[in-house]
Amino acid sequence: MLLARASPAFLPSTSSSPTPLSQTLPPSASFGRSQRTGGSLTVASPNCTVRRPVMAGAAAAVPAAKLEDAEALIDSVETFIFDCDGVIWKGDKLIDGVPETLDLLRSKGKRLVFVTNNSTKSRKQYGKKFETLGLSVNEEEIFASSFAAAAYLQSIDFPKDKKVYVIGEEGILKELELAGFQYLGGPTDGDKKIELKPGFYMEHDKDVGAVVVGFDRYFNYYKVQYGTLCIRENPGCLFIATNRDAVTHLTDAQEWAGGGSMVGAVLGSTKQEPLVVGKPSTFMMDYLAKKFGITTSQICMVGDRLDTDVLFGQNGGCKTLLVLSGVTSEQMLQSPDNKIQPDFYTNQISDFLTLKTAAV
């Protein structure tokens, strides 16, 4: 049986400063099987410390403060991690003031990193999108969940003789190829159909050791069934999700069903929780901290989503700034039903410019 060290998929926290739960799992744990322990999802894996936020149901979240002194926040950290959709752009349209804001932060010696749960593009493809929008961003500063999926498989020494079945788009395929993994599926399976005639039996590749599910505009029943067969029938097959976002910004006109809808379909048919490598799992945070030698307390995570971006920052021990230029409105943030509160919130990242001027 294959063995792997698994990274956690975090549960939503009801505290503004979630306390990590450290849990070391035994070496005998089987490849990719999940267990529920003490009300939290744990992933069975050898020699791996799994960090989870403790659910504090009785604790009240401290309300977020409206950002008034941008200068103080900028000076308090070394690195800014930005979500992309809803923060830097919406669809293919750049949000006002972004270039000037990034220039300001770079002029003050801040490291900028861009992290997106959107798995449709590779890091190289995202680099071209930044360039098209007139932003100078190095490929090494970009971390998409497509890259995270390949990086995770590398981190667990996923066997090169095993294959990865992909429910997703070109970005995942390109990152898997760069990492040297065999794969099948992706957009080419978008036109495949199943004839449900009497006695029909669907074959699947027994060498598939992982199914990676991301946002997929070519999603269909064939893919759900193929991925389900691999996860349920191939011993130790991993179920990996790039993210579980409910909605995404395909255009600047409205919200669209996100990758979480594809993940949910496979979860429903397999009854197995996915291992999430994108936000709010800390896999990418840990990877970034190690790569750049960053102390997480010196990072500010900037995003437009409470349950992914803000939680991602909180799980990693970072300062958090919510911008209202994307998914979350001020009404949603201040709703009594919302239990996730960032340290600060503001309208959009270009407020760094005006609030800086106001403070001088």
Image (cartoon, rainbow, N blue to C red):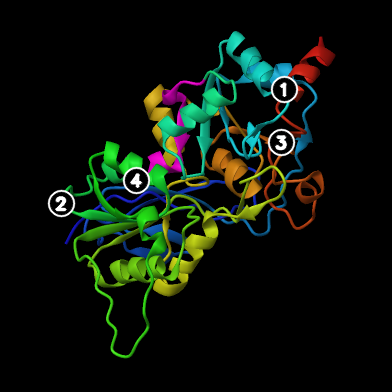
Dot 1 or dot 4: first in sequence order is 1
Q: Secondary structure at mark 2?
A: loop
| Horizontal and vertical percent position of residue 99 | 65, 19
Amino acid under disc 4: Leu
In front: label 1 or label 3: 1
**Above or below, 83 relative to 9:** above
Asked if residue 205 shows in the view, the reply is: yes
Q: Nearer the viewer, mark 1 or mark 4?
A: 4
Few, some or many residues within 10 Å of mark 1 (<14, 14–19, 20+) = some
Q: Residue at x 41, y 23 (%)?
A: 292
Label 4: which secondary element: helix
- Label 4 CA crowd tier, 10 Å (few <14, some 14–19, many 20+): many
Q: Position of residue 50 (x, y in %)?
A: 39, 49
Q: Earlier in the sequence, mark 4 or mark 2?
A: 2
First of labels 4, 3 by sequence position:
4
Q: Residue at x 62, y 55 (%)?
A: 56
Q: Which residues are magenta?
A: 137-151
Q: Amino acid at mark 1?
A: Gly
- Whether residue 39 appears in this view of the structure is no
**Residue type beneath disc 2:** Asp
Mark 3 lies on residue: 323
Q: Nearer the viewer, residue 187 or 164?
A: 187
Q: Look at 84% across and 15% down and name the residue there.
A: 358
Q: Which element type, helix, strand or loop, lies under badge 3?
A: strand
Residue carrying label 4: 173
Please report contact status of discs 1 and 3: CB closer than 8 Å, yes or no: no
User: Under tag 1, what secondary structure?
Assistant: loop
In front: mark 4 or mark 3?
4
> What residue would you read off at disc 2?
161
Of callouts 1 and 2, the N-terminal one: 1
